[in-house]
Image: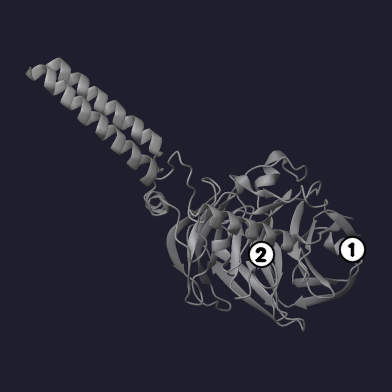
Amino acid sequence: MGRSRKPRAFHAAASALVAACTLVALVALPGAALGAGPAGGAPTGTALIRATPSASAGGATELAGTATPANALEATTRAAPPKAVCTVRDDRLAELSGLAAGASQWYAVADGGSSLKVYVLDRSCTVRKVITGAIDPYDVEDLALANDGTLWLADTGDNSAKRDTVAVHTLRPDGTARLHRLTYPDGKHDAEALLLGPSGVPHIVTKTLLGTAEVYRPKARLRSPGPTPLVKVAEVTIPSSDTPGGPVGSASSALVTGGAVNADGSVIALRTYTDAYLYPAPDGHLVEALGREPVRIRLPREPQGEAITFTPDGTLLSAGEGGGQPIRAVPGAVAKAHAAEARAAERRATDGNGAGPGQPAAAGADERREADKAGLAPIPGFIVAASVVGLVYAGWSWYRRRS
């Protein structure tokens, strides 16, 4: 009598325990079979915002993040390919590496030289003026135009990993120049992308062969000549694509070679040799934007595409090194990024489990953040449930043998 009741009682209790554990695992644990994504409502693997606040130069805080645009929204199906606007034939720009755009003219920088030089172009790619600053740079790789008309040059190239400091230079239209040396917190890096939003805080994005670019910004207000220490605030992983172009085969599509922010700071662009990724920033937070799902725009068949910028009307311009290369345009690029973010916001509102800025995080987001900070991979809920079932079954079998 005792032997018949104990197994039945144990079996009933075990069944209840399995059901309860399975329900808890599926609902509460990160990565459950229900498919809840990270905070922001993006699918798992697209973007993971780490809860690691870093003080900005202005005293505000933003979240450091890791973004992986593996599921980047394809803009190419709704947009015409980039069109050549004009061809750069000036030999001084044979190694064009950075672009910026004003209301009526464009600005370009090239690698090399013994002084700061920014070339002012008209809409036919003809050099109309050269702005020169009395500073000898090491390797200028990118260019940005601040809202006050100041040009920022990213002197951050370091292919041979030799530099103890890198620099950003500011250059006024009258030639007044200032040097701001910078130091990385974790060793030497090669970087070709500069992001400068309306706040005026420069962000440097590294170029790495492994495809995970690191984002740094000054830890404090810039000093001249410095150095000012940098702090790492984000990582962005860009997967390989099938877009043709670039100098290093398939790796060309995963190397960050340029960056840009549009005039109002609502869209951030990172480019590789072959593609551009546009990250919506509706709240103006640059680092947080890199955790959103980007829009990918193909920039095919640029032999060494490194330059990217936005015009005031939201057109994306791209260019690269090599004599006689065109500057190409993608009209309406900013509008496409805004539209993609609006659709994503609608999905988050409909699903009820996504979180934008100021919204509650998706179920399991806090656990994912804590596991990520600890260096632990989140355990899918169905694996936990299966493990519980296995343990309960093993215990039941052992009990029956003992009894």
* Circle 2: residue type: Val
Which of 21 and 245 lies nearest the eye of the viewer?
Answer: 21
Residue 340 position (above or below residue 126): above
Percent x, y of residue 7: 16, 21
The residue depicted at 53 percent of the width and 72 percent of the height is 227
Q: What residue is shown with label 2?
A: 267
Kind of element beneath mark 1? loop
What distance separates the C-alpha of mark 2 from that of mark 1? 31 Å
Most foreground residue, 193 or 7? 7
Q: Residue at x 55, y 63 (%)?
A: 287
From the image, state whether disc 2 or disc 1 is nearer to you: 2
- Visible in this render: residue 29? no
Give the amino acid at mark 1: Asp
Q: Quick one: label 1, few (<14), some, or many (20+) residues within 10 Å?
A: few
Q: Outermost residue toward the left?
A: 2
Q: Position of residue 381 (x, y in %)?
A: 39, 39
Q: Position of residue 358 (x, y in %)?
A: 48, 66
**Residue closer to the observer: 35 or 219:** 35
Q: Secondary structure at mark 2?
A: strand
Q: Say which quadrant the N terminus sits in.
A: top left
In this rendering, position of residue 304 left or right of residue 348: right
Q: Which residue does the image show at 66% across and 42% down from the upper left?
A: 240
Q: Which quadrant of the structure image shows residue 95?
A: bottom right
Quadrant for the C terminus, please. Answer: top left
The crowd level at tag 2 (other Cα within 10 Å; few <14, some 14-19, many 20+) is: many
